[in-house]
């Protein structure tokens, strides 16, 4: 018999039990994984919320808002101080700025007065009216979150301060030490002026530069050349210019007496006017009103280097025999002095600008250093009242010397806490 | 009264300024500001005194023929400026008209006295510069906005004035060199000390000291490195101690001198600056 052919053979199938086990296993795996995923999803949602919550959490408000009248002023100002927020540099560390608000009632409404960066703990509110109580609150604005730029930085507000009222003070308590110094100095000056008026002879040391003024004016007369007088480059509101114009009066009187020609180029119009009056009076006092010409004192320019260039040009063209520099100078001092030196003039300088003194010392024949400029008028006039003021000034110098020596000794022995007595606020 | 009124004004204003330093209460605090503002206004108005005086003296040096020619040219230029000036009252035509009238009056007044002097060229340059800047500023630079960048005035200022000013300032370097050459000579003991101190300060401040200090430390250049550091240190010591001490001493004397002079002026003891004895 032939072997039967399988016509409709069916593919052999997996064993049902194995298949079921595999499917079950897969199902378990999927279910387990899904559960884990499901377990993670709530965790991810919690972190985002925390971040948003952190971005929305305002910093703790500052405490101890203290508002006081600003001291030693003419009123209209209150100083507000506060302790920094606990979340500045610690805790949430999210302080971005402080904003100060002001109101006339502890419950508001409040107006913004100023905004300060983190770290600031004080503000001077200079826009208040005297006699009115003001209340202040400090807002703390959080740093904006870079991950949530659309989230408005949260703000916290402090409690209102106690009421504060501004007022003007009659005495500046921070300047009592300088008031005492002025009183002592002024008293000593007035004392010695009165002594000098009483006929007492006062010793004043020789000042070489002032002793040479006579010789310098005489030299110009003999050589038939001009005397140039430069009263500095500042205006009449500078005390050095006033000192310079005062000396000009003395020099002009000598020039009038010796019949020397005087030329005073000035850099300011007001100085021109004042110097003209001074020179005119000097010529009158010398009995030479006919020799006075108002064009002796003339204006050049306000500009520093334009003035130096103009004066240098005059020096080089006219070759004066004598040049005086008496007043406040800046960088043009050396330009002027060197040019004067190059033409062979005798130069006498005096200034109270310490930075320019070395240039004058190097380039001029005589230099009045600092206080010698201010003493020049008294020295040249020899008036008792003016000489008395020089002696009074020396008393002040004596006291300063005492304090300097005392301070050195105290500092040597480690005592430093009295230097604040000498601070002028 | 010609001397008394200025003395009274000086005394009152001086005392107010002293008092306001110690009494912040009104009216003292505002009085000092008011006086300062008044001075600024007077100072600004007084500029015309000086400017016209300068023009007058310059015309005086030209001589009659040149004065006539110069006046004619200036007047024509001013007319051109007046025609071209903007309509703004105080920053255009009006000041130019005012100056033109003042200039003509001065020229007429100086005509009889004018004699050509050796520095006539500088006087002419002064007048020309003054008139050119005045016309460029008031007539052709947009009136009040004449200082804005791009205007003719600004161009002249930056192209002419600034380089000239810088040149004068730059000359200081050469003047310092020549003054130093004369000053640093060991004529006597003090001059010798000055020379030694100046040597250390200059050597310590120039790049030489820094260069010596940066040499690699080896057997040869270690000494140079030490020298560079020593020079810089010596320079710093001289500037921070003896120099600072001397400057402070001078400033103390200056402060006392200022107090004394101010007191003399306020009390009327010192009167030379207003024409008194």
Image (cartoon, rainbow, N blue to C red):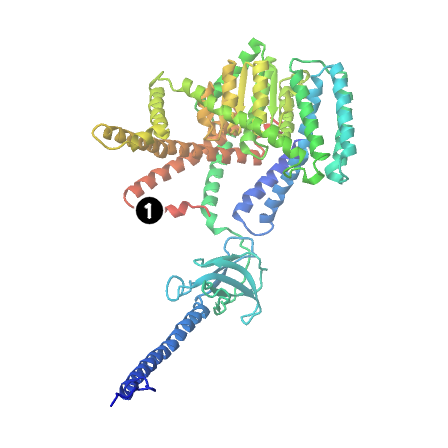
| Residue at point 33%, 86% (across, down) | A7
Residue A26 is at least partly visible in this image:
yes
Q: Nearer the viewer, residue A66 or A113?
A: A113
| Residue at point 62%, 34% (across, down) | B7
Label 1 SS: loop
Residue that badge 1 annotates: A416
State the residue lying farthest toward the front: A1
10 Å neighbourhood of mark 1: few (<14), some, or many (≥20)? few
State the residue lying farthest toward the bottom: A1
x, y (%) of residue A203? Answer: 44, 25
Q: Nearer the viewer, residue B246 or B162?
A: B162
Q: Where does the N terminus of chain A fall, quadrant-wise?
A: bottom left
Q: State which quadrant residue B65 falls in.
A: top right
x, y (%) of residue B172? Answer: 49, 24
Q: Nearer the viewer, residue A7 or B53?
A: A7
Q: Nearer the viewer, residue A22 or A94?
A: A22
Residue A302 is at least partly visible in this image:
no
Q: Is residue B121 above or below residue A151?
A: above
């Amino acid at each position: 018999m032939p072997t039967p052919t399988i016509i409709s053979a069916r593919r052999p199938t997996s064993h049902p039990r194995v298949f079921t086990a595999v499917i079950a296993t897969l199902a378990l795996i999927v279910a387990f994984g899904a559960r884990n995923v499901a377990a993670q999803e709530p965790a991810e949602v919690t972190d985002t919320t925390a971040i948003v919550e952190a971005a929305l959490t305002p910093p703790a408000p500052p405490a101890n808002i203290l508002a006081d009248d600003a001291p030693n002023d003419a009123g209209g100002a209150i100083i507000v101080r506060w302790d920094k927020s606990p979340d500045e540099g610690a805790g949430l560390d999210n302080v971005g700025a402080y904003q100060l608000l002001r109101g006339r009632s502890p419950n508001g409404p409040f107006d913004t007065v100023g905004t300060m960066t983190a770290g600031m703990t004080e503000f001077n509110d200079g826009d208040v009216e005297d006699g009115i109580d003001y209340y202040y609150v400090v807002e703390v604005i959080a740093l904006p979150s870079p991950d949530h730029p659309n989230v408005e930085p949260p703000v916290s507000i402090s409690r209102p301060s106690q009421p504060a009222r501004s007022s003007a003070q009659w005495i500046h308590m921070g300047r009592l030490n300088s008031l005492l110094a002025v009183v002592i100095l002024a008293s000593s000056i007035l004392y010695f002026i009165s002594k000098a008026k009483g006929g007492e002879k006062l010793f004043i040391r020789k000042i070489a530069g002032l002793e040479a003024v006579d010789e310098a004016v005489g030299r110009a007369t003999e050589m038939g050349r001009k005397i140039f007088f430069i009263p500095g480059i500042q205006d009449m509101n500078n005390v050095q210019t006033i000192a310079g114009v005062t000396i000009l009066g003395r020099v002009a009187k000598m020039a009038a007496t010796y019949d020397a020609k005087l030329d005073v180029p000035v850099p300011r119009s007001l100085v021109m006017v004042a110097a003209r009056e001074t020179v005119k009076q000097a010529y009158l006092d010398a009995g030479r009103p006919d020799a006075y010409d108002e064009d002796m004192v003339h204006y050049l320019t306000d500009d520093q280097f334009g003035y130096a260039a103009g004066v240098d040009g005059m020096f080089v063209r006219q070759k004066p025999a004598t040049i005086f520099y008496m007043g406040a100078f800046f960088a043009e001092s050396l330009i002027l002095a060197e040019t004067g030196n190059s033409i062979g003039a005798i130069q006498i300088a005096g200034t109270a600008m310490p930075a320019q003194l070395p240039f004058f010392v190097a380039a001029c024949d005589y230099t009045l250093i600092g206080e010698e400029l201010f003493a020049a008028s008294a020295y040249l006039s020899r008036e008792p009242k003016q000489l008395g003021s020089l002696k009074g000034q020396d008393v002040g110098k004596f006291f300063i010397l005492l304090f300097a020596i005392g301070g050195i000794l105290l500092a040597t022995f480690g005592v430093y806490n009295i230097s604040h007595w000498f601070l002028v606020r | 009264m010609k001397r008394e009124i200025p003395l009274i004004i000086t005394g009152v204003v001086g005392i107010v300024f002293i008092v306001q330093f110690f009494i912040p209460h009104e009216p003292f605090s505002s009085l000092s500001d008011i006086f300062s503002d008044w001075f600024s206004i007077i100072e600004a108005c007084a500029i015309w005194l000086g400017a016209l005086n300068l023009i007058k003296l310059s015309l005086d040096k030209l001589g009659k023929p040149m004065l006539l020619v110069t006046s004619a040219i200036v007047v024509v230029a001013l007319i051109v400026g007046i025609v071209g000036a903007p309509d703004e009252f105080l920053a255009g035509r009006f000041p130019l008209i005012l100056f033109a009238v003042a200039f003509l009056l001065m020229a007429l007044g100086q005509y009889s006295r004018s004699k050509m002097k050796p520095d006539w060229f500088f006087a002419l340059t002064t007048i020309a510069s003054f008139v050119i800047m005045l016309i460029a500023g008031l007539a052709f630079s947009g009136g009040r906005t004449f200082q804005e960048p791009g205007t003719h005035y600004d161009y002249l200022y930056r192209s002419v004035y600034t380089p000239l000013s810088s040149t004068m300032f730059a000359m200081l370097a050469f003047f310092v060199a020549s003054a130093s050459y004369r000053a640093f000579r060991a004529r006597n003991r003090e001059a010798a000390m000055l020379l030694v101190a100046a040597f250390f300060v200059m050597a310590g401040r120039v790049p030489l000291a820094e260069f010596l200090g940066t040499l690699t430390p080896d057997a040869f250049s270690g000494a140079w490195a030490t020298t560079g550091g020593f020079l810089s240190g010596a320079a710093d010591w001289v500037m921070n101690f003896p120099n600072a001490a001397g400057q402070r001493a001078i400033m103390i004397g200056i402060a006392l001198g200022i107090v004394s002079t101010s007191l003399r002026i306020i009390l009327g003891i010192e009167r030379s600056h207003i024409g008194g004895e």
